[in-house]
Image: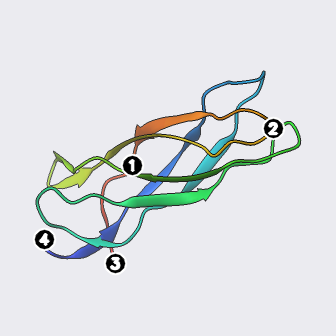
Amino acid sequence: MMNELHSHYYNGNTSINDGHEHGYSGYTSVDPDQPGHIHSMEGDTTVNDGHDHHYKIQTGPEIEYEGGHFHSYKGVTSRADMHTHQMSGYTSLNLDK
């Protein structure tokens, strides 16, 4: 429904860098459902190889699907232990708030 507040769940694994990867999951920011809207994603990865990484990225605009929508995302984690990781994927369908 137009302008209804909602968020999306996301989870995945980062790229493999420096011989390891990290998991991540969370919920996007809560935003109104309007054409071209995006969401923020922020959190910390799992601890692997003695460290974790922070991320703060934005999704792309909504992709309509079977009466709902989802978003793609792509970004880079913060630097830790002299390296970063790539993150990319798709959110869940919209979750009404």
Give the quadrant of residue 4: bottom left
> Residue tagged by mark 3?
97
Residue type highlighted by circle 4: Met
Residue type highlighted by circle 3: Lys
Asked which secondary structure carries label 3, the reply is loop
The Cα–Cα distance between marks 2 and 1, rounded to whole angstroms, is 28 Å
> Residue tagged by mark 2?
81
Dot 2 or dot 4: first in sequence order is 4
Residue 7 located left or right of residue 52: left
Report the quarter where the N terminus lies: bottom left
The Cα–Cα distance between marks 4 and 3, rounded to whole angstroms, is 12 Å
The Cα–Cα distance between marks 2 and 3, rounded to whole angstroms, is 38 Å
Q: Nearer the viewer, mark 2 or mark 1?
A: 2
> Residue tagged by mark 4?
1
Q: 36 or 1, which lies in front?
A: 36
The Cα–Cα distance between marks 3 and 1, rounded to whole angstroms, is 16 Å
Dot 2 or dot 1: first in sequence order is 2
Residue type highlighted by circle 1: Thr
Residue 75 located left or right of residue 18: left
Residue 37: x and y in percent read 21, 60
The Cα–Cα distance between marks 1 and 4, rounded to whole angstroms, is 18 Å
Contact (Cβ within 8 Å) of mark 4 with mark 3: no
Dot 3 or dot 1: first in sequence order is 1
> Residue tagged by mark 1?
91
Dot 2 or dot 3: first in sequence order is 2
Q: Nearer the viewer, mark 2 or mark 3?
A: 2
Asked which secondary structure carries label 1, the reply is loop
Asked which secondary structure carries label 2, the reply is loop
Q: 83 or 2, which lies in front?
A: 83
Residue 70: x and y in percent read 28, 50
Q: For the residue carrying disc 3, how many other residues have a C-alpha within 10 Å: few (<14), some (14-19), or many (20+)?
A: few
